[in-house]
Each structure stands twice: as structure tokens, then as C-alpha cells.
Amino acid sequence: MIAGTWPEDYGSPIFIRGYEGRTYDDVIQAFHDDAVMLLGEGYEPAGQHYVEGDWSVLRAVLATLLLFFFVGIVLWLQMLLWRPVGTLTVTYVRRGNKR
């Protein structure tokens, strides 16, 4: 899933696009599908940056406060067993004379 593009108009020879998904494989698949399409338009990936997802401090505090009601145990188990998926940011550059 594409998270966003900057700048939003495609007239620029360089643009940045972010990808998100439910799993790391979904993120990579979205990037691959988009990169193949953009390669046909003359754009190539010039750089990539992946930022690992993390849980918020508010969620940890809430889970700690709810430990006495046993709901917090479920929240802590979820945070310990599953890592949130991060965001892949890719910079594309137009190569050649294609427009």
C-alpha cells in the first residue's frame, strides 16, 4: 500500500514515495509492483530507507495500568510477540529521455 508521494505531481525528475503494509512481505510486494510500473515510465529507485515500527509509550502505560484487570496482560503479550511493521521510503529518479 502506498503511504504517500512527494511531490504529488509527477512532473519532477525526482520524487519520494512511502510504502506501508500489514507485514514486511506486503511492504516489499507493494514496492516491487510499483517499481516495475515506474520503470516503464523511466523512473528507477535511487535510494531506500526502512524504518522499523514501534509501539507507542501511551500503549505501554495503558497496558501497565490495566494489568490489574487482566486486560493489560493481553496487551503486553501482544506487544512482546508482534512487532508493528515499519515504513519503506524510496527515492525515484527519472533516467534517460523518457517523459
Image: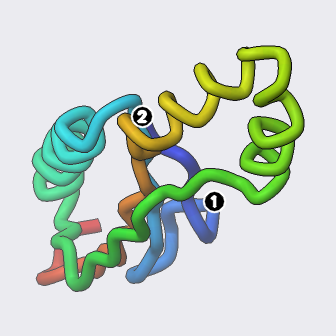
Q: Amino acid at mark 1?
A: Glu
Q: Amino acid at mark 2?
A: Met
> Considering depth in this image, is 12 or 87 the residue closer to the camera?
87
Q: Which mark is residue 1?
A: 2
Which residue position is annotated with label 1? 8
Separation of disc 1 and disc 2 at Cα?
16 Å
- Image location (x, y in percent) of residue 12: 49, 77
Q: Position of residue 37 (x, y in %)?
A: 18, 44
Query: Which labelled disc corresponds to residue 38?
Result: none
Q: Position of residue 64 (x, y in %)?
A: 78, 42
Q: Is 92 displayed left or right of 72 in the figure? A: left
- Residue sitting at 51 percent across and 69 percent down? 11
Q: Which mark is first along the chain, 2 or 1? A: 2
Q: Residue at x 22, y 68 (%)?
A: 43
Which quarter of the image is occupied by the C terminus? bottom left
The residue located at (31%, 74%) in the rendering is 92
- Contact check, label 1 and label 2, Cβ < 8 Å: no
Disc 2: CA contacts within 10 A as few (<14), some (14-19) or many (>=20): some
